Image (spheres, rainbow, N blue to C red):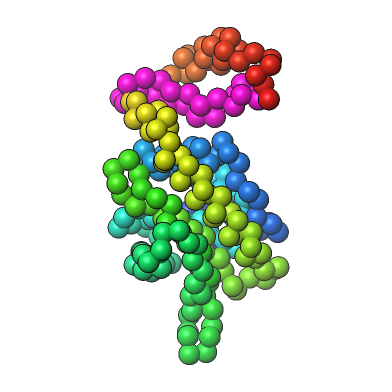
Amino acid sequence: MPTIAERFQAETGRKKEPVETCNCPDAAMLFTLAFDLYNAGDVRASAIDSIEKSLPGNCLFFLVKEEGYLHPENFELLPIDVIKETIKNDNACIFRQQMYINRKISELACTLFCASLGRDVNGNEIAGGVVYSNNWNWAGVNEEKLYGFLAAVRRFYDAFSGSRTIAEFAGNNSAFRYVVDLSTGGIIMHCPPIGHGPETEIDRQVSEYLIPAIISNGEKN
């Protein structure tokens, strides 16, 4: 049976380099991920790529909404019913489950970590998790790191989806919206109004004139 890393490469077309540790996701990436999930839109590739690069090479990050996978699309390694059955009894926990190729001889295929993240603006339930291969030719996975990783994603989404300010920001589809890193003045995320494509000239003016005028040196902390 192919390893998780081999399936990752085959199903996504991206090569997953092995790394030894699991890094904590940064706030800018988590904001982008949470915004896209909550707003029921497509999840930006930049957020997914950032997450994938922070995980060990034999791990695969996945997202589920209602009856299908958001990421990776058309994922066949784990039936969607396995995820739904795993999380259905308790939305407050991160669940760990061993998946076997042949349970009679305890031949492990992979280990699954998953949790309910919450609901989007339309009330659809979202779940996320990590599945990692137990058949790998280098050091094993630190499972405590995976628990911490998934807990960080879940806490951030819970805070995001429970904020009235964020809900108003996400629901305002008639204006250009920007999320800015106060320490650098850089644009974390840009959301144009519905029906508008990328506005590079507006982005340039916001970056060069508006943000510097708003953020004083004393606020860059």
Between 118 and 80, the one nearer to me in the picture = 118
80 falls in the magenta region = no
Between 153 and 164, the one nearer to me in the picture = 164
| Residue lying at 41% horizontally and 59% vertically, measured from the top left | 91
User: Eyeballing the image, is 190 above or below 107?
Assistant: above
User: Eyeballing the image, is 204 above or below 103?
Assistant: above
User: Eyeballing the image, is 62 above or below 111?
Assistant: above
Image coords of residue 49 (percent x, y): 54, 45
**Image-based side of 196 in relation to 144, left or right:** left
Residue bounds of the magenta highlight? 174-195
Image coords of residue 52 (percent x, y): 56, 51
Between 146 and 133, the one nearer to me in the picture = 146
Image coords of residue 35 (percent x, y): 43, 37
Image coords of residue 13 (percent x, y): 50, 53
| Residue lying at 58% horizontally and 39% vertically, measured from the top left | 27
| Residue lying at 48% horizontally and 14% vertically, measured from the top left | 201
**Image-based side of 44 in relation to 54, left or right:** left
How many numbered discs sit on the rendered protein? 0
Is the C terminus in the top left, top right, bottom left or bottom right quadrant?
top right
| Residue lying at 54% horizontally and 78% vertically, measured from the top left | 108
Regarding residue 45, the answer to whether it shows in the image is no
Regarding residue 22, the answer to whether it shows in the image is yes
